[in-house]
C-alpha cells in the first residue's frame, strides 16, 4: 500500500536502502516517446550520493537498467521497468540501532505498524527510495518536453541564508555550484554554513523552490483533485519535507484582496494576469502563468552526536549517530522536487485530454 502515485501516468517504486536494488515501474506512458537513457542517467546523477563535499559520502553510481517497455529507444505503451543496483551498503553501520528507536526517524512508527522493520539505513523509509522517483520523473520530463513544459528547481534557502526571488535569478545557473543555488554570492554563504554544520556534527534544513513554465490552461480537476493539492501531496511525500506553499503562500495573509487579486489582461491571443500571486493556479486549475512553489526540508534526523532514546522494550538508551549522511539534504533534493512535479503535471496533461469531447 502507498507505493504508487498517479492516475494515468502512474509510478510504483520498490526496494530498500540496503537491499539488492531499488527501482520504478512506470505505467501509462504513451507509446512512441523517445526514451533518452542518457538524460535519465544525468537526472539520477544529480541526485546520487557522494557527488560533493557537502553531501553524504556513500558511493553509488546509480546506473539505471531498463528492463521492459522500451524497444529500439521508443516507449511501447507497456509498463516501463527501471532498476538501480545498490552497490555501497554498509549494513554494519546500523547494527547498533537494531532494537532502538532513533529520534525523529520512522523506526518506531514502522515497528508499531508492521511488527517488523528493516533497520539497515531505514529500509523502505530511507531517502534512497527517491532515486526511483527521479528515474520515473525523468521519463515524465521527456513527455513534458514534447509540449514545451519545463520544470526547474533550485535551493532558495539554507538555515537563515536566503537567495533572491526567482524572478531576479537566472535559473540556468543552478548547476554552477554544489549547493544548486543560482545566485553565486548566496551559494558561497550556503556552502560555508553547511560545511560548518558538518564540522559541528549536526545538520540543517532549507527550502527548494520550483518553477514550472509553459503549462497550458486547464490542468487540474475540481474539488478534491485540484492541481495545487496534488502538487502538495507529491511534495509532502518526499522524505524530510515539512512544508509546502504555492504562489503567495503564507505571505499572502499580509495583503488585502485589492492587492492580492491577479487582474486579467489581453496579450496577443492570450488572456494573462498582471500579477501572479495565484502561483499559476486558480480554482485548482492551471491558468497558463508560471507555477511556482516552495518546499521546506527539515534538518536531517541522523546527527553524529549521542542522543537519548528508548529501545523496543521502552528501556532508556543512548543512540549514537553512525553511517554516512547529508548535513543538509536540499542540494540533492532539487532533482527529486523536479521529478515529483513533472509526474504531477504529466499525469494531469494526460487526464486533460479526456475533459471535453473536442480533445
Image: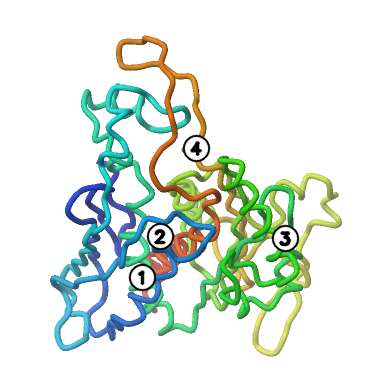
Query: How many numbered discs sit on the rendered protein?
Result: 4
The answer to whether the residue labelled 2 contacts the one labelled 1, judged by CB atoms less than 8 Å apart, is no
| 187 left or right of 94 in image | right
Q: Nearer the viewer, mark 3 or mark 4?
A: 4
| Near-viewer residue (131 or 11) | 131
Q: How is the image coloured?
A: rainbow
User: Label 4 belongs to which residue?
Assistant: 304
Separation of disc 3 and disc 2 at Cα?
22 Å
Label located before the other in sequence (3 or 1): 3
Above or below residue 352? Residue 268 is below
Separation of disc 3 and disc 1 at Cα?
42 Å
Label located before the other in sequence (3 or 4): 3
Label located before the other in sequence (3 or 2): 2
Q: Which mark is residue 49?
A: 2
Relative image position of residue 192 (x, y in whole percent):
68, 57
| Near-viewer residue (118 or 303) | 303
* Residue at the (59%, 58%) spot, across then down: 208
Separation of disc 3 and disc 4 at Cα?
23 Å
| 174 left or right of 80 in image | right
Amino acid at each position: 500500500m502507498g507505493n504508487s502515485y498517479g492516475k494515468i501516468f502512474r509510478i510504483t517504486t520498490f526496494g530498500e536502502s540496503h537491499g539488492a536494488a531499488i527501482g520504478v515501474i512506470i505505467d501509462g506512458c504513451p507509446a512512441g516517446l523517445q526514451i533518452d537513457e542518457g538524460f535519465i542517467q544525468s537526472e539520477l546523477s544529480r541526485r546520487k550520493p557522494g557527488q560533493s563535499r557537502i553531501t553524504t559520502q556513500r558511493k553509488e553510481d546509480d546506473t539505471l537498467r531498463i528492463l521492459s517497455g522500451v524497444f529500439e529507444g521508443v516507449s511501447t505503451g507497456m509498463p516501463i521497468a527501471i532498476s538501480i543496483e545498490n552497490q555501497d551498503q554498509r549494513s554494519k553501520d546500523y547494527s547498533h540501532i537494531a532494537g532502538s528507536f532513533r529520534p525523529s526517524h520512522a523506526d518506531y512508527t514502522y515497528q508499531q505498524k508492521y511488527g517488523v522493520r528493516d533497520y539497515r539505513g531505514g529500509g523502505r523509509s530511507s531517502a534512497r527510495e527517491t532515486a526511483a522517483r527521479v528515474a520515473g520523473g525523468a521519463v515524465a520530463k521527456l513527455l513534458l518536453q514534447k509540449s514545451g513544459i519545463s520544470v526547474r528547481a533550485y535551493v532558495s534557502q539554507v538555515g537563515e541564508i536566503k537567495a533572491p526571488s526567482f524572478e531576479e535569478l537566472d535559473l540556468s545557473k543552478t548547476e554552477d555550484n554544489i549547493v544548486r543555488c543560482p545566485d553565486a554570492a548566496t551559494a558561497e554563504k550556503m556552502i560555508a554554513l553547511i560545511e560548518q554544520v558538518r564540522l559541528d556534527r549536526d545538520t540543517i534544513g532549507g527550502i527548494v523552490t520550483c518553477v514550472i513554465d509553459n503549462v497550458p490552461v486547464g490542468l487540474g480537476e475540481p474539488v478534491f483533485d485540484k492541481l495545487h493539492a496534488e502538487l502538495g501531496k507529491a511534495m509532502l511525500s518526499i522524505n524530510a519535507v515539512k512544508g509546502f506553499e504555492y504562489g503567495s503562500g503564507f505571505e499572502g495573509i499580509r495583503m488585502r484582496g485589492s492587492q492580492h487579486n491577479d487582474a486579467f489582461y489581453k496579450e496577443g491571443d492570450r488572456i494573462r494576469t498582471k500579477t501572479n500571486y495565484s502561483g499559476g493556479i486558480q480554482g485548482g486549475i492551471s491558468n497558463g502563468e508560471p507555477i511556482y512553489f516552495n518546499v521546506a526540508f527539515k534538518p536531517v534526523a541522523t546527527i553524529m552526536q549521542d542522543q537519548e532514546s528508548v529501545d523496543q522494550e521502552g528501556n532508556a538508551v543512548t543512540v549514537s549517530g553512525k553511517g554516512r549522511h547529508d548535513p543538509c539534504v536540499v542540494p540533492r533534493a532539487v532533482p527529486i522536487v523536479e521529478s515529483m512535479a513533472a509526474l504531477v503535471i504529466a499525469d494531469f496533461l494526460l487526464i486533460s485530454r479526456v475533459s471535453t469531447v473536442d480533445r
